[in-house]
Amino acid sequence: MEDSLHHAVSVPHEASMTGCEQCVSRRDFIGRAAFAAAVLAALEACGDGQIGAPTTLPDGPFVVRVSDFPGLSTTGTLVDVSSVAPARAVIRTGTATYTGFSKICTHQQCITDVRNNRFECPCHGSRFANDGSVITGPAERSLTRVNVTVNADGTLTVG
Ligand code: FES
């Protein structure tokens, strides 16, 4: 009886002789657990766990020199002016008229890309036309417009 109990709880001979070469050491385990916790905390901070932090439109206004953006010389061409006016895009609508947009997606506030003369959101795939209206969801609302003023020196003030 004592002998059969001993066999039931003993470690197999092979495992006890070779150790556990593929096992994780306690230090590795703690390090990996801490890394995983940090990643989860970072994703949680992003709202729904998506990559890409939600954002708000930086305060303006910003001055945009039309000559720095060749696309603004053509009516109907959507131009990303984020390099001087963060998270904004402008389209020329006439001889001396422009419309400005926030590039922040109305779904969950990712910054859209200006591509193919429209806005494309990298987070969940919403697309917006060059007038800001929704082409494809999940976004349900048009992009927010920002004021654009044409200045005497040919620059634009983008709100
Ligand atoms: S944030 Fe979800 S589609 Fe843009």
Image (cartoon, rainbow, N blue to C red):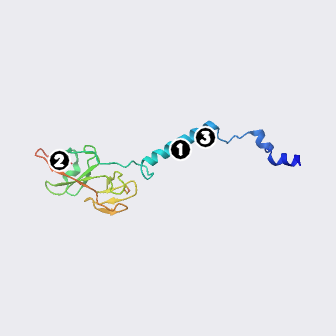
Residue sitting at the far left: 152
Residue 36: assigned label: 1
Residue sitting at the far front: 1
Residue 95 in the image, given as x and y percentages of width and height: 13, 55
Rendered view: 155 above or below 78: above
Residue 14 in the image, given as x and y percentages of width and height: 79, 43
Q: Could you tell me how far apart the alpha carbons at marks 2 and 1 are, in whole angstroms?
A: 47 Å
- Which mark is first along the chain, 3 or 2? 3
- The amino acid type, in three-letter code, at marker 1 is Ala
- Going 25% across and 43% down the picture, which residue do you hit? 84
Residue 54: assigned label: none
- Which residue is the site of mark 3? 29
- The amino acid type, in three-letter code, at marker 2 is Leu
The quadrant where residue 140 appears: bottom left
Residue 81 in the image, given as x and y percentages of width and height: 26, 47
- Going 80% across and 46% down the picture, which residue do you hit? 9
SS of the residue at dot 2?
strand
The quadrant where residue 59 appears: top left
**Callout 2 environment at 10 Å: few (<14), some (14 to 19), or many (20+)?**
many
Q: Could you tell me how far apart the alpha carbons at marks 1 and 3 are, in whole angstroms?
A: 10 Å
- Which residue is the site of mark 2? 156
SS of the residue at dot 1?
helix
**Callout 3 environment at 10 Å: few (<14), some (14 to 19), or many (20+)?**
few
Q: Could you tell me how far apart the alpha carbons at marks 2 and 3 are, in whole angstroms?
A: 57 Å
Taking the image as shown, residue 58 lies to the left or right of residue 9, namely left
Residue situated in front as seen by the camera: 116 or 61: 61
Rendered view: 6 above or below 27: below
- The amino acid type, in three-letter code, at marker 3 is Phe
Ligand 1, by image quadrant, is bottom left
Taking the image as shown, residue 100 lies to the left or right of residue 114, namely left
- Which mark is first along the chain, 3 or 1? 3
